[in-house]
Structures are given as structure tokens and as C-alpha cells.
């Protein structure tokens, strides 16, 4: 299990549940290093002070809040820890709402909450209440130098804590110029589109999806290690659909042929 990113308590009413929070997602993307092209040596990124014209050691580093390009206010870790904010070590529950009320766009990072010793019963009580009522708890907590709005919801045997973006962080579709155009969709096109979607309906099985780009990169690395030539793949040109009705009909026909072939295979 990875290191806990938060250790504190969940508080609602007079109930306090000691918990630890762990990342609920482990990213598996491709991690490249930056190399010197001439000798393929990984480059180093040093802490360099342009005023003192020298490299700075880790123990010489501190945080600073920029008031302007040239004016910084130093802030120490001790000063941050002395801030009198209830949510520094507490997930302060503000209320309970229907999960469907929260647009998925607001969701951010997910964390698994684990009860500390002595908090198991209260933890189980909260999890079961959320499961049986279909509600989620909404609260506030400070994680990594930012106060987050969070929701707590049941997930299998655990309680999942999900951070929410603030409303002023959400980008409005009104800012997109091409959405301001008035577009008319014909009834025939709508019905054909619905028929196509109906043919594509199915259950969501997340285990069927994988990162094919990551797999392709790892295969490329393997081939280069074995002295093989790197594969040449031409990117598919993407063009806007001009005749929407024709494209829908062709898509539907192609899908029917594919399903017929699968049925006879």
C-alpha cells in the first residue's frame, strides 16, 4: 500500500472517526527521462540561484508566495502548521446530499479512507448509512496545502473520499465559440443516430479497456533493445463528416455486418 497522504479524522456532529487516506488510483502512464542527445545520459535538474550564481542545497530551500515577479514573501512549514483552520487535520462534514446532485465534472482525486484503531465501529456505521440511504457526505479538508471540498461515499467495504473542484474552477461551455452557432438536426438524422447508439449499447466493463499507447511504447522499447527497427505507423487523417445522414447509414450497415460475422464465427 502507498504512503498515506492524510492522517486525521472524519467529524460529523459529535462523532469523530480517526482515519488515514490513501490514493485510490495508481497511474500507469509512460515515464520518459530527458537525455543528452549526444551521449544518451539523463540530464540533471539542479536548484540554481541566479542571484548567488550557485547551486542550492535542499536544506537551504524554503517556500515563498509571489506578490509580483520580483517580490516574494517567505513562508515556513512551521507557520503553515500554526494556521488556525479546523480542516487541517479534520474532514469536517457539512451535510449529506443525493449523489446524483453532483455533476461528475466536479469530481477530482479519489482516496480510500482506512479507520485507525478504535474508529472501526463508527467508520462502519457511516459507511452503512451512506450505502442504505444513497446519500454522500459533503465536507471540507486541507490536503497538500489546499482546502478541498470533498464527498465521502461507500465503495465496496471502504469509504471513498473524492475531492471536488470549486465552482469558479469549472470552465463554462459558453466560452467555446463554435457552440454559439445555431445548428438544426433533422428528425431523420436523430432517429438514425439513436438506432446506431442502440446497436452499440452494452454493459461497461472497465477491465476490457487498457492503455494501448503505453503497450505500444513498451513494445517499441523492447524492439529497440533487441536491435529491431522501430515500426512506422501513419496517423489516421481525421476529417469532419460532411454528409451526416450518409455516414450514419454506413456506420449502421457496417455494425450490422460485423455482428452477423461474429454470430456465424
Image (cartoon, rainbow, N blue to C red):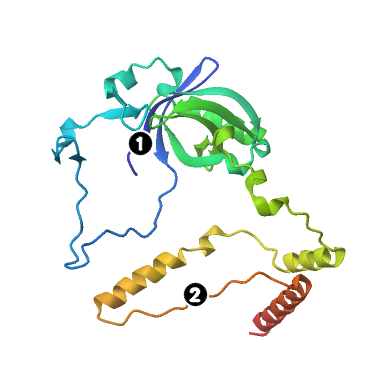
Give whichever of 237, 161 is nearer the camera: 237
Image check: 32 left or right of 136? left
* Vertical relation: 60 (above or below) 222: above
* Vertical relation: 224 (above or below) 149: below
Q: Residue at x 33, y 20 (%)?
A: 81
Residue 94 in the image: x percent, y percent?
57, 22
Q: Earlier in the sequence, mark 1 or mark 2?
A: 1
* Vertical relation: 248 (above or below) 101: below
Label number found at residue 4: 1
Q: Say what secondary structure mark 1 lies in.
A: loop
Q: Are marks 1 and 2 in contact (CB under 8 Å)?
A: no
Q: Quadrant of the N terminus?
A: top left
Q: Is residue 157 visible?
A: no
Image check: 148 left or right of 245? left
Give whichever of 37, 127 is nearer the camera: 37
What residue is pinned by disc 2? 235
Q: Residue at x 40, y 80 (%)?
A: 232
Q: Residue at x 43, y 17 (%)?
A: 85
Q: Tell me the mark number nearer the camera, choosing from 1 and 2.
A: 2
Q: Residues within 10 Å of mark 2 (few under 14, many from 20)?
A: few
Quarter location, residue 125? top right
Residue 37 in the image: x percent, y percent?
22, 66
Q: Residue at x 28, y 76 (%)?
A: 224
Q: Quadrant of the C terminus?
A: bottom right
Q: CA distance from mark 1 to mark 2?
A: 42 Å
Amino acid at each position: 500500500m502507498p504512503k498515506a497522504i492524510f492522517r486525521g479524522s472524519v467529524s460529523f456532529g459529535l462523532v469523530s472517526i480517526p482515519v488515514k487516506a490513501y490514493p485510490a488510483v495508481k497511474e500507469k502512464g509512460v515515464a520518459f527521462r530527458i537525455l543528452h542527445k549526444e551521449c544518451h545520459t539523463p540530464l540533471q535538474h539542479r536548484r540554481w540561484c541566479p542571484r548567488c550564481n550557485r547551486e542550492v542545497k535542499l536544506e537551504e530551500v524554503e517556500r515563498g508566495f509571489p506578490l509580483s515577479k520580483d517580490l516574494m514573501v517567505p513562508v515556513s512549514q512551521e507557520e503553515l502548521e500554526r494556521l488556525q483552520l479546523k480542516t487541517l487535520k479534520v474532514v469536517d462534514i457539512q451535510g449529506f446530499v443525493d449523489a446524483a446532485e453532483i455533476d461528475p465534472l466536479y469530481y477530482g482525486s479519489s482516496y480510500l479512507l482506512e479507520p485507525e484503531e478504535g474508529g472501526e465501529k463508527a467508520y462502519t456505521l457511516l459507511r452503512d448509512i451512506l450505502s442504505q440511504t444513497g446519500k454522500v457526505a459533503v465536507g471540507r479538508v486541507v490536503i497538500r496545502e489546499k482546502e478541498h471540498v470533498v464527498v465521502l461515499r461507500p465503495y465496496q467495504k471502504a469509504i471513498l473520499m473524492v475531492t471536488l473542484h470549486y465552482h469558479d474552477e469549472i470552465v463554462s461551455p459558453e466560452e467555446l465559440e463554435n457552440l454559439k452557432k445555431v445548428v438544426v438536426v433533422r428528425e431523420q438524422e436523430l432517429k438514425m443516430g439513436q438506432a446506431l447508439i442502440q446497436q452499440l449499447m452494452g454493459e461497461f466493463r472497465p477491465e476490457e479497456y487498457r492503455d494501448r499507447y503505453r503497450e505500444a511504447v513498451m513494445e517499441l522499447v523492447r524492439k529497440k533493445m533487441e536491435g529491431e527497427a522501430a515500426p512506422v505507423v501513419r496517423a489516421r487523417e481525421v476529417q469532419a463528416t460532411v454528409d451526416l445522414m450518409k455516414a450514419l447509414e454506413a456506420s449502421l450497415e457496417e455494425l450490422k455486418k460485423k455482428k452477423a460475422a461474429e454470430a456465424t464465427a
